[in-house]
Image (cartoon, rainbow, N blue to C red):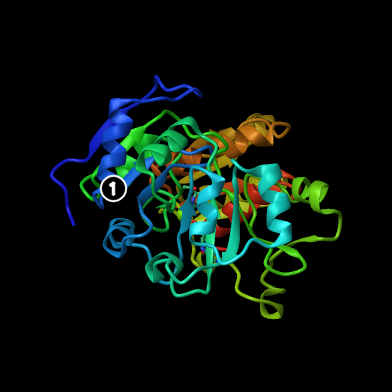
Amino acid sequence: MSYKQTKVWNVDNLNDGYTSDPDIKEAALWIKQGEAVAFPTETVYGLGADATSDSAVEKIFKAKGRPGDNPLIVHIGSKKQLTDFVAFIPRMAEVLIKEFWPGPLTLIFPKRANVSEKVTAGLGTVAVRMPDHVVARALLKEAELPVAAPSANQSGRPSPTKAQHVYHDLHGRIAGIVDGGPSGFGLESTVVDCTGDIAWILRPGGVTKEQLESVLGEGSVRIESKKQKSHHAPKAPGMKYRHYAPDSPLVLVEDTKSLQQNLQEAKETGRKTVVMAVNEHQAMLEQDTDAFICLGSMNKLEQIAAHLYDNLRQADQWDADIIFCETFPKEGIGEAIMNRLEKASFQS
Ligand code: TXA
Ligand code: MG
């Protein structure tokens, strides 16, 4: 499918008391008519299509070049919609919905038979989330449909946190983009499977393990890792692919001393480098690299998360032989930041 033009709607005038807007109405109409339309959420931009239509959902996979065995998240505008396509709501899910919806938390449910196989990639479960962003909520309200939406990037590339990122990856391949300014958190939602006794984090994200534990109790939340994979039901199928990756190879380096050594070696062999590090380490590193990209302050991980994908895209523009990036402690938001960096690097 190709489009002569991808329409861009600018909607910077919406506020929380949304009633009506002609641009949102048009974008919603296009979704109802079976088109794929990108829109901002509080995590990253999503590429949305009618989750009840096989042909609309197919357009998402085609536009992104996404493997068909990687299921999509269904986005809803009100909690009432959940029972339309979920077989039952586990007790733990009820608690999490009450606490975290709308918000950056995706929950896995046993699905009802009416959910398209295209959305769930043939699994017996469906992933659902209720986004907390004025544009996403307005669009879902006007569309009056469950909307399947992966991140609106070309498959494998860093997720989009600005409308320009979506345009760069998908113009001519999708019908339209609703531009609502930069997305909020900057990394995707946390995906949690709570169909059993334990809440398994299949993908760390906007809601941290610590936050989940604060409502479910300590010991009842675990993070899925490669080691645990064989012991229980499926992890998020999407996590097996290399993801979020710039075109130049990305190498993670744990401490600044080794980073300096790596840069010396690269210099000696005439390789062009980009360094991504916090401003506290800038003075120490910038003279030995072709480009330095400041990730923010090591004391403000939320800022690092919000700009990480944009920084990965910028690093790529240098056409470097190698991109070095420093690492962060895997606690709180650091868990999601490191998960994305590891997936983007050659080490995972
Ligand atoms: O923040 C987000 O979640 C964004 C915004 C647009 O909402 N969406 C997003 O979608 O990140 P996507 O498609 O890029 O990632 C969805 C993840 C994948 O890792 C996929 O494998 C997993 O959720 N997933 C979807 N359905 C699943 C299911 N039934 N069981 C396990 N994992 C599932
Ligand atoms: Mg994605």
Counting from the top left corner in percent of width and height, residue 40 is at 43, 37
Location of mark 1 (residue): 32
Up the image or down, 242 lies above or below 69; here it is above
Q: Residue furthest bottom?
A: 230
Up the image or down, 271 lies above or below 28; here it is below
Up the image or down, 137 lies above or below 236; here it is above
- 258 sits left or right of 70 in the view: right
The residue carrying pointer 1 sits among few (fewer than 14), some (14 to 19) or many (20 or more) residues within 10 Å by Cα, namely some
Q: Is residue 268 visible?
A: no
Quadrant holding the C terminus:
bottom right
Q: Nearer the viewer, residue 340 or 70?
A: 70
Give the amino acid at mark 1.
Answer: Lys
What number of labels is visible? 1
- 282 sits left or right of 176 in the view: right
Q: Nearer the viewer, residue 5 or 113?
A: 113
- 286 sits left or right of 30 in the view: right
Counting from the top left corner in percent of width and height, residue 258 is at 69, 50
Q: Nearer the viewer, residue 328 or 261?
A: 328
Q: Residue at x 71, y 43 (%)?
A: 99
| Label 1 CB sits under 8 Å from any ligand 1 atom | no
